[in-house]
Amino acid sequence: MASPGFWSLGAENGGDSGGQSPITARAWCQAAAQKFTGGIGSKLCALLNVGEVEKSPDGAEKRHVENCNCITKPCSCSKTNLGFSELYSTDLLPALDGDLKTMTFLQEVVDILLAYIMESFDRSTKVIDFHYPNELLQRNNWELSDEPETLDDILISCRATLKYAIKTAHPRYFNQLSTGLDMVGLAADWLTSTANTNMFTYEVAPVFVLLEYVTLKKMREIIGWEDGRGDGIFSPGGAISNMYAMLLARYKMFPEVKEKGMSSVPKLVAFTSEHSHFSIKKGAAALGIGTESVICIKADERGKLIPSDLERRIVEAKQKGYVPFFVSATAGTTVYGAFDPLIAISDICKKYNIWMHVDGAWGGSLLMSRKHRWKLNGVERANSMTWNPHKMMAVPLQCSALLVREEGLMQSCNQMQACYLFQQDKQYDLSYDTGDKALQCGRHVDIFKLWLMWRAKGTIGFEAQIDKCLELSEYLYNKIKDRDGYQMVFDGKPQHTNVCFWYLPPGVRYLEDKVERMKRLHKVAPTIKARMMEYGTTMVSYQPQGDKVNFFRMVISNPAATFEDIDFLIEEIERLGQDL
Amino acid sequence: MASPGFWSLGAENGGDSGGQSPITARAWCQAAAQKFTGGIGSKLCALLNVGEVEKSPDGAEKRHVENCNCITKPCSCSKTNLGFSELYSTDLLPALDGDLKTMTFLQEVVDILLAYIMESFDRSTKVIDFHYPNELLQRNNWELSDEPETLDDILISCRATLKYAIKTAHPRYFNQLSTGLDMVGLAADWLTSTANTNMFTYEVAPVFVLLEYVTLKKMREIIGWEDGRGDGIFSPGGAISNMYAMLLARYKMFPEVKEKGMSSVPKLVAFTSEHSHFSIKKGAAALGIGTESVICIKADERGKLIPSDLERRIVEAKQKGYVPFFVSATAGTTVYGAFDPLIAISDICKKYNIWMHVDGAWGGSLLMSRKHRWKLNGVERANSMTWNPHKMMAVPLQCSALLVREEGLMQSCNQMQACYLFQQDKQYDLSYDTGDKALQCGRHVDIFKLWLMWRAKGTIGFEAQIDKCLELSEYLYNKIKDRDGYQMVFDGKPQHTNVCFWYLPPGVRYLEDKVERMKRLHKVAPTIKARMMEYGTTMVSYQPQGDKVNFFRMVISNPAATFEDIDFLIEEIERLGQDL
């Protein structure tokens, strides 16, 4: 921990109050209550007594149950002295007299979380304490039973859960496109949980609905749509946002499909690059279009869709009597981080009257950077765009937006006008009841963390954070491109933070038998990755692609990462792979 | 507040430390640091100094910037004395030296949240401080700008957001099927946010994936599937769970639909009661089946599907050459709380070889109650079931499960085997990489709050909570069924906690002109509801249904509600409606 002991109360040791004897703590409690009015004495008193324990000769922990002498009654001492081992969830609010117990319990949980956060940012701790599934099942009792457990057991479960969790905030966690933990975003998510409401109507989420409105408008302005006009919604992830876009494109061309289904329309075909995200095919399967109707367009060696191939395949499809209705360009592919040429694609879409969607789940956030937004030139011509702030902007999971240029389309495409939810005779402006735009009925509040982070950083703060990640990836690229034992998967500086490379350990590097060499190289990344997890030092992803054997895909979205962490990653790959 | 002042530090007043002078607080800080080792002194010291403010003669607040005399350095005093008005999010972790500032900031947020929780459970506070959208937009600056704001501004935004939020924990909040706030569930959601990971692979969510496995198995056991066998997933809400079920049913009958789309299959038809949830039609629209292919089956006067009508319509459809593939029975309809007769429906489904789905989003939780689970008799014969613990079990939003009897079907229906995520050469048992079962790629961790609440309550705790809500609704029913001015929408004791009724104010009650009476009665519920929101005293839903004019739909899922709150609701309806 960066600051050992500071928040140790109740963190690692189940509430040992930092070394002082219980007597001293009680004396403090009394003094606190006498010195202060207005509640602060009781607060201190409670903090001191939470988890005040004493080891009995047999080693078992005993909690003090004597009453304290606080002058303000009721104070929390007597209650918390009962100890969580004698309290159950039914003692918490809404239980009568449950307020102090609730506060104490929640504060204890927060102390555990704060300690975990401190630890997560500390490079000397493990990213993961890895165990195989069967092993992990045995390491703790995870079963559900008929009988309740004490709050003490609940706190133990919280600690155990965190002990075996991935520290996604760790500066050396690079495994996914979503990494890092933003402190303002976290605070906002805690608030969201506490507000515990649903996005479907203004009635039950007035502030959050307004903030969604404000934020979506801002995002559309950044895309470049006039006055930020258009529509949009936050959905449960990029795959669903992409599916929504496909649904809208189909409805726009054939509105009768909503009532009559696919049997009323000609054979539809969609187009996307061979490097695009699998959610385009998943969406097509779900929507009854079928994966075979998603035509994969060739990408160049950098992973960018080749516009001439797109046009050729569109013409071909039309000749067969199919109806091209949807092109999904990718702004930031998952593996290579490639940006499809949006202007050329938009020209083709316009020519053939096809809905142009931009899947910017990963790369969309580069619009926030004056230095890098040119990579999305042409996005303003799109009909819709997926943009996941939970990736490159490091907003806590989940936070994915679908932006749509045409107003009103989402509503007419998806609405069912349930009379018990979207009553037409409410007292307020019903355009704020946005729930019927979605396929979901209830919808989680994903907006507040993005909004609050945006307030805290400003657009320039996001820009700085994004630019820094790109700078780190360029540093990595420059460091390994000519380094012994490394081979880049594609030539040239990466456009996004994806750096794809093979590490060739000495035993593989000089092998002359090409087949044998590929066979062994294919196993290098999985082996090093498995070792990384065993040691828990860092985590980075790998995969094969097409005819290419397993390679590392390094991505940087973690705002905690530094140049030294990049150096560490390279050293660690070499350390763990030297014998392969 | 239940315990005024106790947690007032930083709550309502922006950090006024409870009345003591800053000098005293600093003296305390010094004493704390001297008396204790192991960090607790610093902790107290930090708490005392957070938001330590002094009013200058012109009324402006000034924060102390002098250094304290803590003997353990660095202590937090000097830093927190800087005040949040001089700190930015860039001062927090991962900033160098950001640990104490981070802790102090997060603790300040937690204090705001704890105060909000206390307030929410207090009946003397408003459920909502209602403002019309335009008014609310003007009450605060909600705009996003290029420049960052200070942490002080961020805290102010947090307070403003909560000020205008609905207090969903309030004992008199009855507006939706999801109400109340469980303290263990909340703690679990805070932990989930802190862990900030994704459910797609065991690699990045080892514990949560295991807990999902354990919990889904337990839920399947409770449904009555042998040894809890089967499959399932947590999805973003009941509407998506229902859509998944329809997707699986289609795939089971015509697996080629995944590749070839709806054009490869005959015309499919689905069946559900006219009282069922709108998500069945939304799902059919999305999946390319079309809303017209959802055949609405007549319900009886209590809202239950009539099996003979179901069979008649199935036969009719088959005669037309359509293929019936899906029946969605509802266990707990949204408005009436009706339970469709599952045994009779399952006989019909078996006879005609149709997938039987049970939408138990609202009523499924009654399976936890030995007293009420008979209402779902026959559910064990279903092929799939939607069950939303975020409704009747009061798990924080969102928490919706789809349970599926056949193993392996979800995987083959939805998988796309993305090689960058579901690598086949990982070191652990790949059956724990459950992400490819879903349409989503990233998937929010919804499991931990349910799992932790289940541990805290035990099955019997959930049972008691559910039984109590049903008892309260029976109390309400008995209270109003013969009361002057009330008319029940349907006869007999409700099966779920839905109590549907008209309140006829004196001015309407004795009107002889039937048409005029209906016209005026239609406006009663919306008017009373609007007044409830203006006063902020309670919230309950209303709607028309078929040819029935607007009536109140009272539902009880809020564990904080008591008999007195039911009495209050009736008094309030009468108070607010007496002049109508």
Image (cartoon, coloured by chain):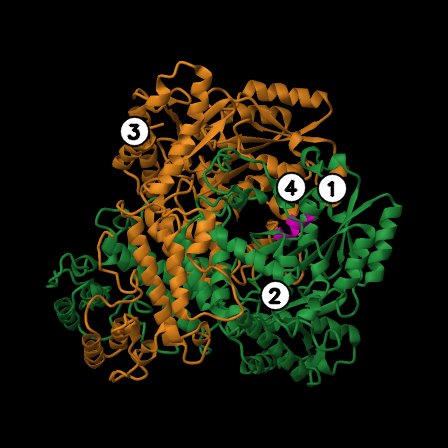
Chain colours: A green, B orange
Residue at the spot x=22%, y=64% of the render? A43
- Marks 2 and 1: same chain? no
- In the rendered image, is residue B267 in sight? yes
- In the rendered image, is residue A128 in sight? no
Report how many numbered discs are placed on residues in the image: 4
Query: Residue B447 at x, y = what percent?
Result: 46, 52
Tell me the crowding category of disc 3: few under 14, some 14 to 19, or many 20 or more residues within 10 angstroms, Cα based: some
The residues bearing labels 2 and 1 have C-alpha atoms spaced at a distance of: 33 Å
The residues bearing labels 1 and 4 have C-alpha atoms spaced at a distance of: 20 Å
The residues bearing labels 1 and 3 have C-alpha atoms spaced at a distance of: 52 Å
Q: Amino acid at mark 2?
A: Ser
Of circles 1 and 3, the one toward us is: 3
- For the residue pair B451 and B363, the one nearer the viewer reads as B363
Q: Amino acid at mark 3?
A: Tyr
A19 in relation to A68, above or below: below
- Marks 2 and 3: same chain? no
Upstream in sequence: badge 4 or badge 2: 2
List the residue tagged with mark 4.
Answer: A413
| B189 relative position to A9: left or right | right
Quadrant location of residue B190?
Answer: bottom left
A437 in relation to A475, above or below: above
List the residue tagged with mark 2.
Answer: A365
Mark number, residue B475: 3
Query: Residue B38 at x, y = what percent?
Result: 27, 78
